Each structure stands twice: as structure tokens, then as C-alpha cells.
Image (tube, grey):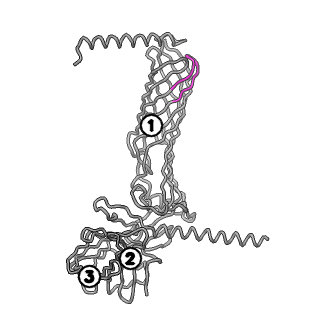
Amino acid sequence: MIQASSLKILLTMLSIIHWGIISQAQEKTGNHESNDWYVRLIPEAGFHFPVHQVKDHIAIRQNINALYDDQLGSMLQASTIGLSSGCKAELANDRFKSGISLGLRYTSYKTRISGSVAASSDFLYLRYGQGENETKYARIRSLSERNDYIGLPVEIRYSLLHYQDFRFTVRIGMEIGISRTFQENEIDFHNKDMKPNAAEVLQSVIVPTKALNTNTYALLGAEYGKQGKTGLAFEVFLPGNFSSNNHFVLSEGRSFYGMKFSVIVPITEIK
Amino acid sequence: MKNSILIIFTVFLVFSLNSCQKSDDFALSETIFIHDPYFPGLPIYSEWGYNTFGAYIDRKPFVSTQSELPAKVLVNSDTVHLILKGRMNGQAVELRFSIKGYAPVDYFDLVSLNQDTINLKETGRALKLKISNQTYDLNIIEGELIFNKVQKLFVDEEPSKSIISGYFRFKTFFEDEPIAVSHGRFDLGIGYDNFYNY
């Protein structure tokens, strides 16, 4: 059991070490005095890769997720990628080695399902109608959807390490969904004569989804640039989490990975 | 020279289209065996035309295989025969249901069996079990064959085949001993390649 006196000594030593690190940081802040608040403008762009699986209601004839002996070499591919761009304003202070930012971000997610019933073919069978006495399949090359969102990212940054012109950072954030600005589902038929039936086939696929995309995330990254000058940053998601698993028609999943590139532009000093 | 190139191109195109067509048909005839987690060894019950069947014969799974055509429908005079071909304990086994008084002209007519339950004990019903090369006429104690769903299959809005899906179970005497065939299920595509009317 740790003695109270030993704990006091340990806490005192940690405080001295922490004060020492802060002092060193203050000597390296360059143009800014240690207690100056300043604003940085951060335009950014990035990629999101949601971790997901095809929703159960997508009635593709072969259940590729189940175990069965497949002698024809059939396969199913599903992919989702998100492209984002935005701009944030960050209120930063080098004494605290941190900043808080608010901005706007536009993200476009594209999901695509494709595959083949056999190694020598390029289509899947999608069931789109089932009445009392009939079942309808369509041969499809792919199903795709696109969803675009506007969100409000709120982030807190902390600089872990400062080495010459590099700063290694950790950032936690939340993107509050404001609006879904675009939603579209498309189907590519193997038989072009089926195009007039696209609406009927898509009707079997489309389900209600959440209109707003809110997510939380953490980022680990690095900034490069002289203090008070324009710099660059690269960050990696650790991963992020969607607020629900019902954002997309074709797939579902709660987490995502990705990366972000930013330009850091110091704007003003607030004394 | 031009004519030769045109002929070669046409032959190539015909072969390409034919190979695509064969791939289409065969993919629908393929057996898709998804294991039932609640009944080890048996396929799930489905209504997709997965070309599977399975049942326990005194707890031994009798199931369809990848290599053999799992079912044939034969219509002769006024009797329809549903033949299930599979394996049990590594042996080739065939189960034949014969139903007198029903004679569909083609495989699309099978939809008239939708939601029908056939009492296997009634007159005009017969079952045969063939194990390896030995055929046995079964004396049914009780049992039923249920056509839960029989439907026409359309692919790209064109009629393709009929899908017959359902259950079966029965008790019978086999080599002077009563046996039970239980938890039987089938999901079969019946089309040009496995429907015979003669």
C-alpha cells in the first residue's frame, strides 16, 4: 500500500517535471509570448474509410457471408469511401500547448456493392420482387449510393511534443451533423433492357436512413512549420465512430478510419 | 479477306454469347448449401432456389451434394414423382415421393402445389428409398410432404424456372424396424434440365 508521504513526494516530483517541460516549451514558442491567444485558420481535406458490412435486407442470391462450399468462385465486394473538405478557425495558446476549433466540413460518402456469381461472370442476382407465386431476380453489375453531409466540427488539440519545427499533436473532436445535402442510389444492370425497371428494383433496396451524420473521433498527427508562419499538418483517425449505424442504405457500421491533410495559417493575436 | 474476318468474328461472338448463357443457367442450377446452425449437417430452410434438401434419417443427415443434381420431377400419365438424390454416411441415397392424380404439363404448372400439404399415408401416395443399388418400397406409418411455397422465377423479367420449397417428415418400416425421417426441408429449382413429362 502506498504511504501518503510517498504519494506526496511522487506528486511533487511530477509537478516539478511538468513545470520544467512547460518552461522549455515557453522558451521555444518563437514570436508568441507564452500567454498570447491567437487564431489560426485551418483549411483541410481528408478521406474516411467506414468499417461496414452489407445490410441484411440487400437480397443478393448468394449469402456470401455464410459458410458454404462454392465451386464457381463467386464473390461479393463492398466498399465505402468518404471524401471531406472544410475549414476551421482555431483559438490557440502555446502556453497551454493546445487549441480549440470550430468550423464547417463537407463530406461525401460513396458506397458500391459489386461481385459475380462465378469467376467467369460479372453480375450478381438481386431479388427485387417476391409475390405469392413469383420471385423476381435482376442480374446486376453493381449497386451504389452517394450521401453528402454538412457538419460542424468542434475539436480540441493538444501538442504532445515539440521538436524543432515539428509539433506532434493529439486531437479529439465531434462533428455535429447539420444537413444531408445529397442522396442518390444507382443500379448498373447486366442486361441493359432492364433500365426501365430501375425504379422498381431500387424500391426493394432503399430503406429510411438517418439524415444527419454526427460522429466523434480522435486524431494523432504532426504539424510542420515555423511558429507564426504558415504550416502543414497530417493526421490519422484513431478510429472515429458514427452516432448510429443507419447512415447508409446499402451498408452499416459504427466506426471509420481515415486521414486528413491541413494547411495552418496564423491569422491574429489576441492579447 | 474481309469476308473471312467477318466470319471469324461472328463465330467468336456466337461462342462468347453461348458461354455467357451457359454461365447464367449454371449459376442458377448451382447448389448453395448454407448450414443450419440449429440442425447440424442440414441446410437452412430457404425459398431462393438454392437447390438443397436435407433430413435426418434416424439422426443421420441425408443431404444434397454439390456434385449431383439434387432433384428431378418426373410426370408419367397421372402421377408425378419427386426424386431427391443425395448422400448419407458416404452412401448414395435416393428418396422418391410419388403422388397419383396430379400431372403438371410443364414446370411452371408446379405453382398449383403452392401451400399444399400431401398426407403420405393416403391412397395414391408412395415412397421409395434407394440406398446404394438397393431399392425399398416404404410402408408409411404416418407423414406429410408440405409445399410451403412454390413460385415462378423470373430473371430480368423473363420466366426461368419454378422454385419449390417446403418440408417433409414421415415414419416408416425399414428392414423390419421403424425409422423416422425428420426435419426434412427442400428448396429446389425445377426447370428444363430436371423436369420430365413422358
Front residue of B141/A141: it is B141
Name the amino acid, label 3. Leu
Label 3 crowd (10 A; few <14 / some 14-19 / many >=20): some
Question: Furthest residue to the bottom?
Answer: B77
Chain of the residue on which disc 1 is drawn: A
Residue topped by disc 1? A178
Q: Position of residue B115 (x, y in %)?
A: 31, 74
Chain of the residue on which disc 2 is drawn: B
Front residue of A139/B13: it is B13
Q: Position of residue B133 (x, y in %)?
A: 35, 80
Q: Residue B66 has which mark?
A: none
Q: Residue B111 has which mark?
A: 2
Q: Position of residue B70 (x, y in %)?
A: 40, 73
**What segment carries the magenta color?**
A222-234
Work out whether residue B169 can be spotted: yes
- Quick one: quadrant of the N terminus of chain A? top left
Left or right, A109 with respect to A254, comes to: right
Chain of the residue on which disc 3 is drawn: B
SS of the residue under disc 2: helix
